[in-house]
Structures are given as C-alpha cells and as structure tokens.
Image (tube, rainbow, N blue to C red):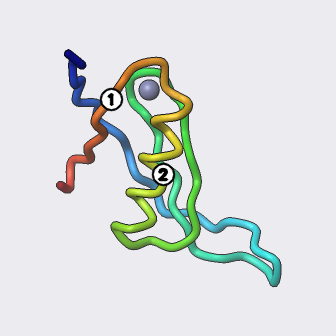
Amino acid sequence: MARTTRVLCTVEETELEGDHGPIDGVVVTCTKCGESAESFGTSIASIRRCFILLREQCDEENYYTTEDE
Ligand SMILES: [Zn+2]
C-alpha cells in the first residue's frame, strides 16, 4: 500500500528563455528536498506539469500541493 505524503511546494512566476525571447513561466520548488521544475505559462495547468516533473525527481511518492489550492 503506497503511503501518500503531502508535500508543500512554492510557486514563483518567472521569465523563461523561449525560442523567440522571454516567456512567462513558473518555477515550482519542493519545500522538502529543494528540487525545482520549470514550465511555460502561469496557469494551474503549468503548475500541474511542474508537479509531474517533480514527481520524477523526488525520492518519495508524493502528492504535491501549494498554499493556494
Ligand atoms: Zn521533494
């Protein structure tokens, strides 16, 4: 049985380097291990994409959450 650990992440809006110049994006950082993931766009879909990337980087099986949700 998998244990779900709720991990708080911080979300920062940033400018990422796109093919045609800077693009608005988000950086999501895991407060537990410090891993971070970037994604283009600032919508909830972009944040969710970062969660998926983080899940591959984090050691544990985690359920990510932000203070906003
Ligand atoms: Zn982590």
Relative to residue 8, is residue 4 depicted above or below? above
Q: Residue at x 54, y 31 (%)?
A: 35
* Side (left or right) of 63 relative to 50: left
| Neighbourhood count class around disc 2 (C-alpha, 10 Å): few under 14, some 14–19, many 20 upward | many
Q: Amino acid at mark 2?
A: Cys
Quarter of the rendered image showing ligand 1: top left
Q: Amino acid at mark 1?
A: Asn
Q: Which sits in the foreground, 6 or 52?
A: 52
For the C terminus, give its image quadrant. bottom left
Q: Residue at x 21, y 47 (%)?
A: 67
Residue under numbered circle 1: 62
Please tell me how many numbered marks the rendered image carries: 2
Say which quarter of the image contains residue 21. Answer: bottom right
Residue under numbered circle 2: 50
Separation (CA) of disc 1 from disc 2: 13 Å
Relative to residue 28, is residue 56 depicted above or below? above
Badge 1 vs badge 2, beta-carbon distance below 8 Å: no
Ligand 1 within 8 angstroms of badge 1 C-beta: yes
Q: Position of residue 12 (x, y in %)?
A: 46, 55
* Side (left or right) of 45 relative to 23: left
Relative to residue 3, is residue 68 depicted above or below? below
